[in-house]
Image: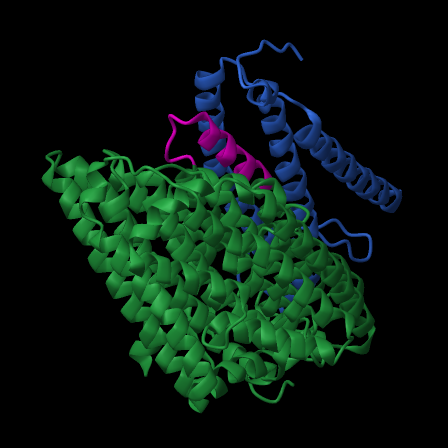
Chain colours: A green, B blue
Amino acid sequence: MRIMEYLIGLLPFFLVAVSVIILLIPILNKSWKSQRLVELLSLTTSGIAVIMSLLVLINVVENRVVSYRFAGFKPPLGIVYTVDLLSSLLGFLSMTALFLTVLYSKWFIISEWKYLYYSLLFLLSAGSISCFYTGDIFNLFVSIELLSISAYGLVAFYRSKPTAIVASLRYAMTGIVATSIYFFAVVLIYSAFGTLNMADIALKLRNPNAITPFSQSVLGDIVLTSKIAFSLMVWVFLFKTGILPIGFTWQPHVYSEAPLPISAGFTAIADSIGIYLFMRFFTTILGWGVIEELVVFRITLFSFIQVLAIISAFISVLLMIVEKDIKKLITYSTISQFSLALLGITLDNVFGVVSAILLLISNILGDAVLFYLAGLLIIGCGRSINCIAVLKNSKSMVFSLVVAILNLFGVLPVTIGFWGKALLVLAGINKSITLPIIVLVVSGISAIGYFKLLHVMYTYKAVTRSDQELRNTVIPKTIILLLSTTLIVLGLLFTLYEPFRIFIINVGEDLLGNYREYIVKSIGVEGLI
Amino acid sequence: MSEVFIQLAFRTSIIAFIVNIAIAMYGVYTRPSLIKKFICLIMFTDAINLFALFIGFRVVNNTYPKPPVLIREPVSPGELEEFKYIAVDPLPQALVLTAIVISLAVFMFVIGLILVYYEHYGTTSIKAMRSGGVEEVFE
């Protein structure tokens, strides 16, 4: 039991340690063997990270909420990692994406600076897992910064390309503004609540008279401060998710200029954090049961985010139709899926939150399939969507493309994406008839963009370049097939296997209604709520 | 007198904070020079860091805040109670220190990116990127 708790604290540290070791290998040994050693080490350690995150997930399924106290300091005095079903599930997905990215990079990336690439990738993952596991809002700021700086570095990996430098600059400058605003919000929260612990803040938002050890009672006007701080945080999370208005300034550029395996991994490792933080801050912290003075504010804020999510979804699907660059097309697809997931969260019911989780999972896997397929056509032909014609000679790749498209479009109940959209429609019906219509219209427009790929594949002719990398495509094709099969397996499991369906619904229910357990297990004191 | 002075200083600081934020945001989003954008980013983060430091100060019964250090030992319960109310909270300072260290790393990276941008375009103006070529801009 204790070992499992230590595993939570050990995982980010393990990833940072690997990152440092990878950086040291070429310094100690400059021969070509060091490149192979870096690849081998990255592959092995990312595999270990997947197993560690899986063990954490299994432990959390048994105990619902597990916390780890750094250096044994009791929260809210010390930093605590509090892991619930959602954070452990997304943490596992993030680590799986890391493993797949490392595996795909072994085939795709040819560079003498490979060790820097892997080192940054592991730092990115350390930041990501720390964001998912942390139960402290300032530790979250540090984790976001760790994630961001490694992401800026990875985007600028091809430094000989001016467009990559410009994309990284865009990302970095917008990112610095966003994270500074987040820091400002953190300071505001501390000024009123006298604590940085998420569970402590969640407790005081429900019971302002609660006196917790160390942080004691609230220090200032928590109503006004919460209104300002949480409104500011919305912009930061919108930036991280890549949703309108800030997201459009960086995400299409970053996704199209970053090395392809990174673009594929970004969805799971970096961008899903925005949606996760929305869920964490607006369900666990400012969620059900908050003081009356903030109920109206929460509803107003959700209505505002709802409008943004709908506009963002419409703009992204419209841009998807006209886009000719395969990487940008997938980016706009990601933005539209994230916008719908955000819409699900703002509906503030179990089906809405579950739909957001399912859309997140389906988008992480579906996007990865599309990006990995894009890798084949970028090497074989180019970045134009017309180049997708090179895939038609391989039946397995056509199958994977069709599965990924059907999943993201969400039309067949055999894929997990279908259930994401179906539950979103069901959740929307409870609120207003307009919302399901909007979801269906957005999906309909996005279908034009998705099926354009199939149309182009069968009507255009593309000549495959002779590239050394194309001589052995076992690794990418295996990953693509594995992911597309996973999409179907998850869809079938959700349709036919009740325990899996109950597990996913429990994740949503726990997030919305089980805040008591989160607070009690995180702070370690009962009877306060 | 001291109360008027403290109020004045506090209000001036808040106004300075808002003005700094506004100027920095204007610079980041409108200036074409990357160096000017960079300077504005530093202004932006520093303004927020300065604001964070203010959070730790408390003025109770017209007494000036004290450093969060107890010099003499043993401390009587009365002194400890007074210390609790008057001493500056050291946590915001620790937060700011961490934020500054992180900012340093990020800013070093950004300045490196600007340098590479300069190597590509021969200027630090974003107009060069938009026009697709090298352009001399004196702003």
What residue sits 47% from the left and 47% below the top?
Answer: A456
What type of secondary structure mainly makes up the magenta span? Answer: helix
Quadrant containing the C terminus of chain B in the rendered view: top right
What residue sits 59% from the left and 18% below the top?
Answer: B131
Q: Position of residue A28 (x, y in %)?
A: 14, 38
For residue A119, say whether it is visible: yes
Q: Position of residue B129 (x, y in %)?
A: 55, 22
Q: Is residue A39 or residue B46 the one in the foreground? A: A39
Left or right: residue B116 compared with residue A346: left
Quadrant containing the N terminus of chain B in the rendered view: top right
Q: Which residues are magenta?
A: A156-174
Q: Does residue A466 belong to the magenta stretch?
A: no
Q: Position of residue A242 (x, y in %)?
A: 58, 50
Q: Is residue A299 above or below residue A100?
A: below
Q: Is residue A220 above or below residue A335?
A: below
Q: Is residue A264 or residue A189 the one in the foreground? A: A264
Q: Is residue A317 or residue B1 the one in the foreground? A: A317
For residue A64, say whether it is visible: no
Left or right: residue A253 compared with residue A243: left
Q: Position of residue B82 (x, y in %)?
A: 69, 62
Left or right: residue A451 compared with residue A247: left
What residue sits 31% from the left and 63% below the top?
Answer: A481
